[in-house]
């Protein structure tokens, strides 16, 4: 893992908020828009897991999905609780990001590192 600067996390959360306002309006003000993918490079995956919001995206390189993901508490309007991770996945490889002792968020790099998707590990839904 690589250390993430506070400026990067602030920028990532600001980008997430911009993406959220550009998307369709959720059912309530407290509910985040969900986008589970599969998404192409540079497009966000947006998900709420428990009491955490997650934004993840990837940049292709060297035949891999170079993923960046940021999580923050849903009730934290200033995103002071934000934390992130950067990692590289081979095509077909998955990673689980734990948000609590009982909840996690699983991402899967698609074929030829062309897409990234959130998957339900109980159903093993595959990305394109």
Image (cartoon, rainbow, N blue to C red):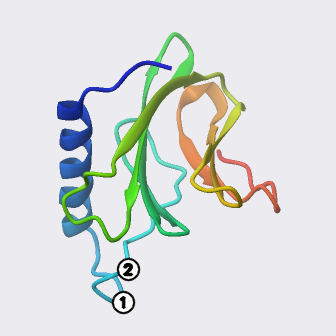
- Snapshot quadrant of residue 4: top left
The structure residue drawn at horizontal position 55% and vertical position 69%, both measured from the top left corner, is 50
In space, the residues marked 2 and 1 are separated at their CA atoms by 7 Å
| Number of dots carrying numbers | 2
Q: Taking 94 as reference, is 29 above or below it?
A: below
Q: Is residue 57 left or right of residue 17?
A: right
Q: Nearer the viewer, residue 47 or 4?
A: 4
Disc 2: CA contacts within 10 A as few (<14), some (14-19) or many (>=20)? few
Mark 1 secondary-structure assignment = loop
Does residue 41 lie above or below 61 as drawn? below
For label 1, the crowd category at 10 Å Cα-Cα, with few meaning under 14, some 14 to 19 and many 20 or more, is: few
Q: Position of residue 89 (x, y in %)?
A: 61, 25
Residue 30 horizontal side relative to residue 115, left or right: left
Q: Residue at x 56, y 20 (%)?
A: 64
Up/down of 42 relative to 91, above or below: below
User: Which residue is under mark 2?
Assistant: 31
> On the picture, is 104 further left or further right than 38?
right
Q: Is residue 66 visible?
A: no
Tell me if label 2 and label 1 are in contact, CB under 8 Å: yes
> Which secondary structure, mark 2?
loop
Q: Which residue is mark 1?
A: 27
Q: Specify the quadrant of the image occupied by residue 79.
A: bottom left
Eye-nearest disc, 2 or 1: 2
Give how far across and how far down residue 67 sits, in percent.
Answer: 47, 31
- Rendered residue at 63%/36% (across/down): 110
Q: Is residue 107 something one can see in this rendering?
A: yes
Frontmost residue, 15 versus 36:
15
């Amino acid at each position: 893992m690589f250390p993430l600067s506070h400026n990067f996390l602030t920028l990532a959360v600001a980008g997430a908020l911009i993406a959220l306002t550009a998307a369709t309006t959720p059912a309530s003000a407290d509910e985040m828009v969900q986008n589970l993918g599969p998404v192409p490079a540079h497009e966000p995956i947006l998900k709420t897991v428990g009491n955490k919001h997650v934004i993840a995206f990837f940049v292709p390189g060297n035949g891999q999905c170079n993923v960046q993901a940021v999580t923050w508490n849903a009730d934290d309007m200033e995103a002071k609780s934000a934390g992130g991770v950067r990692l590289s996945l081979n095509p077909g490889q998955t990673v689980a990001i734990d948000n609590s002792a009982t909840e996690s968020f699983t991402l899967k790099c698609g074929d030829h590192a062309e897409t990234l998707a959130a998957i339900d590990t109980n159903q093993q839904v595959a990305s394109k």
